[in-house]
Amino acid sequence: MNVAEWLAATARLRPRSPALLRGFDLEADYATFARRAAAIGTALTRDYGIQPGDRVALFATNCTQYLECLYGIWWIGAAAIPINAKLHGREAAWICSDAGAKLTFVSDDTIEALAEAASDLPASMKTLSMDSSAYVKMREGEGDPSPLARETDDLAWLFYTSGTTGRPKGVMLSHGNLVAATLCYMVDVDAATPDDVSLYAAPISHGAGLYHLPHVRMGGRHVIPESGGFDPDEVLNIGRQLGNVVMFAAPTMVRRLVDAAKKRGENGEGLRTIIYGGGPMYLADIRDAIATMGQRFVQIYGQGESPMCITALGRHWHADTEHPRYLERLASAGPAQSVMQVRITDADGKPLPAGETGEIEAKGAAVMLGYWNNPKANAETLKDGWLRTGDVGRLDGDGFLTLSDRSKDVIISGGTNIYPREVEEALLTHADVREVSAIGVPDADWGEIVVACVVLEQGAAANDQTLDAHCLTSIARFKRPKRYVYLDALPKNNYGKVLKTELRKMMGK
């Protein structure tokens, strides 16, 4: 089925229910939301030649128009490519080119970045700002009241996630994958209701954006903060005024929210459910969060390849303080979600018993179709239907998964993955840099920060500001190193491979 059918159904059943809000201001009820999506879909076909299966990108900051466009794309059977609005224009252009995007929706704060990378874009690709009068005209037109029928395995969401090579890979998620993830949400994460307020303080372009699906199906409200992002005081105010708020937050966001609640002498009133994931949540932090804000928390573990949908530590597990292994469970990521299987394997891919540590593998209806035009990565990552996550962990006898490490060197800063090679390649193009290795170092605010260990060319002078400015010419601001360490040489093994483990030890990690 086409997931856009959920919007069409809700518009028929609850046409006057509030749907899209900016802050406290209503921008569309469900009848209007669905009519706009249908009109956008029709215009995409009529004016831009978009056909079923074609790819349409969204490179924009959070806004209500984002959801209108997303459903407009699905309405006509096309596939959406959500692109992180924080990316450098060249990075976004590469994604558009690799995916063969025919059109990219932008916002006024991203359009210039993409325009500066015009030479890297597909020659025939068009751009349209969601903030333009042309867009308003598009969504006020007429459209087919029924979304185009789609099959379970038809592509719906093409999400680009980098690998250890630093090159982004397009994760192909089907309509069936999104249905499976949505059903898991309702069973394992939270019971969506028509009274819910789904708050988008994290980027819609990431996994948090997929959580609009259960709330569209149930006819809840979708609220974009006035700030467009995450501001702890704003979130607390929305909770108090609207009530029944559900939101996704990276662990760093949770810590900031808890700090703000403490400062205000509040407990998060009106925030019904805070779903956290996307990075490590330390036991001390979740205990502090519960002590301050009560039992409002649910943890999920997933990847782009199985979106938000491998394991879940539900509210009841957070609250089961009488269990003899309560703290052990609280430090885990919970048991497998309902459409998923999870196992731990050794270096040869053989399943390991409970308590043994190895690579985490997942199998089930939420696992991606595969990577876009990347058979080599598919062969390495998908084995007999099992997704090799690249993460390391262990299962206890009850099936609770505890993450212990990452086999890849991904740095998770503020809940966002940063891949060292991207940083290293950017720095290595500077004339003063002879060698560099980027690592993640623990940080109280961000979870991890990027530290660049640099070996300079002979005679070159250390200058953080110069290297920082150079990074910003090719990679996004949030990926640049927060700290530079200058060394005479990088530690290496006999084969000349840089030993990141030794660098981490040097940094006290």
Image (spheres, helix red, strand yellow):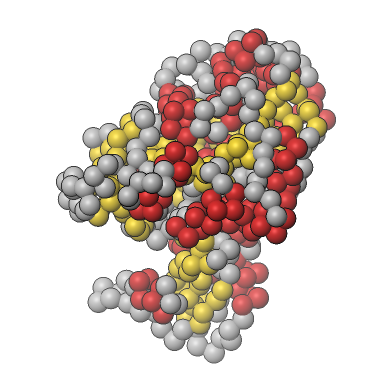
Can you say whether 259 is above or below 364 in the image? Answer: below
- 99 and 450: which one is in front? 450
Can you say whether 281 is above or below 20 in the image? Answer: below
Q: Is residue 399 visible?
A: yes
The percent position of residue 103, horizontal first and vertical second, equals: 63, 32
The image quarter containing residue 209 is: top right
- 245 and 324: which one is in front? 324
The percent position of residue 5, horizontal first and vertical second, equals: 56, 15
Can you say whether 77 is above or below 113 in the image? Answer: above
Residue, x 25% and y 55% (percent of image)? 357
The image quarter containing residue 23 is: top right
Residue, x 18% and y 47% (percent of image)? 353
The image quarter containing residue 347 is: bottom left
Residue, x 47% and y 31% (percent of image)? 185
Name the side, left or right, on which 182 lies relative to 472.
Answer: left
Residue, x 38% and y 46% (percent of image)? 322
- 150 and 8: which one is in front? 8
Q: Can you name the residue that lies furthest to the right here?
A: 133
- 353 and 345: which one is in front? 353
The percent position of residue 374, horizontal first and vertical second, equals: 38, 41
Name the side, left or right, on which 432 lies relative to 303.
Answer: right
Q: Can you name the residue that lies furthest to the front here?
A: 322
The percent position of residue 215, horizontal first and vertical second, equals: 59, 26
Can you say whether 224 is above or below 360 in the image? Answer: above
